[in-house]
Image (cartoon, helix red, strand yellow):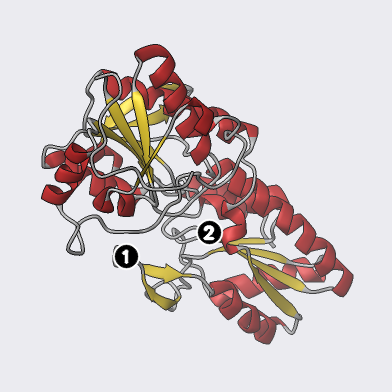
Amino acid sequence: MTGMVSETTVRQDGGMRIGILTSGGDCPGLNAVIRAAVLKGIAIHGYEFVGFRDGWRGVVEGDIVPLGRKDIQGIAKQGGTILGTSRTNPFEGEKGGVENIQRVLERHGIDAVIAIGGEGTLAAAKRLTDAGLKIVGVPKTVDNDLGATDYTFGFDTAVEIATEAMDRLRTTGESHSRCMVAEVMGRHVGWIALQSGMAAGAHAILIPEQKTSLEQIASWVRSAYDRGRAPLVVVAEGFVPDHEDNAHSERGLDAFGRPRLGGIGERLAPLIEEMTGIETRATTLGHIQRGGTPTAYDRVLSTRLGLAAVDSVVEERWGRMVALRGTEIVHVSFEDALGELKTVPQSRFDEAAILFG
């Protein structure tokens, strides 16, 4: 997709024109959402679609590209997003704000917006909807931390990638009789760490929901080592040891004022080695978890959410987000979607902790 659509774009058939954006961190499954929404909107309702480039940046600057059937062919299996993404705050800068965005939509004849994103994206969408814009949401976060939906696409893929990486770390750890620390994503919640850690047979799983002492971590590591194992410690980026107050951050703030996390694994490794005498190495998986081909589960979930987003537009469910409840797709308000994080319950952590050490 190249080139910006002209300043005065006119609808071809007088039908509804919908803009789609992907904002925040990318993850596997975004393209499947775009594909499903465009296919259903065109085939069933005769809608016309355009995509905003780079999330909210494309909205505030009017940077759009056409989304026809040929533009979305074969993209469901691709990772990332064909529209690009960014962490632009639509309320900042001289082009930001409700009035400017309204003018951009009117200038390009865009009647409604499908916003695909996580907490920051949906919070911005709620503010714009409250101001009268017509927006529906699709939840996206690899952390799986939105309370209004049972699962978010990208999570299953991230867990698979992390599990495979840990399997590889264990073989090199066993070769050298080392303790291996694997740092995975998880700003506020530890779902990726819990699921991948259990799957990989980790000897300790450290998550934001659980304050854990260095002494306890060292005890788990030593117990595994004494049984002839190469200990594997899995830590979420947002984990805070019990002697500290805030998650480790040394890279400043993002566009929404949140600390950029990362590096807790590298901090823990020398402490574990000092306390246990066991050679310890840390690996941060980082953006590897976001990249590549989505799993079959994520492709199907993304597709179903994209189809349901078009239903939201048809039924004028502005200010609402599609979500998964059990096996059904439902519609929830932005307010409910943002109301509560889906944290790891104590019972799930206790279940996993039986296997530690």
Q: Position of residue 259 (x, y in %)?
A: 37, 70
Decide: is 16 above or below 257. above
Decide: is 278 above or below 212. below
Can residue 228 be seen by looking at this rendering? no
Q: Residue at x 83, y 67 (%)?
A: 172
Decide: is 227 above or below 214. above
Decide: is 332 above or below 338. above
Element class at badge 2: loop
Q: Amino acid at mark 2?
A: Met
Can residue 64 be seen by looking at this rendering? yes
Task: Verify CB contact (< 8 Å) between mark 1 and mark 2.
Answer: no
Q: Position of residue 197 (x, y in %)?
A: 64, 54
Indicate which label's residue lies in the foreground, 1 or 2.
Answer: 1
Q: Residues within 10 Å of mark 1 (few under 14, many from 20)?
A: few
Q: Residues within 10 Å of mark 2 (few under 14, many from 20)?
A: many
Element class at badge 1: loop
Q: Residue at x 69, y 82 (%)?
A: 273
For the residue pair 122 and 163, the one nearer the viewer reads as 122
Q: Please give the label number shown on residue 185.
A: 2
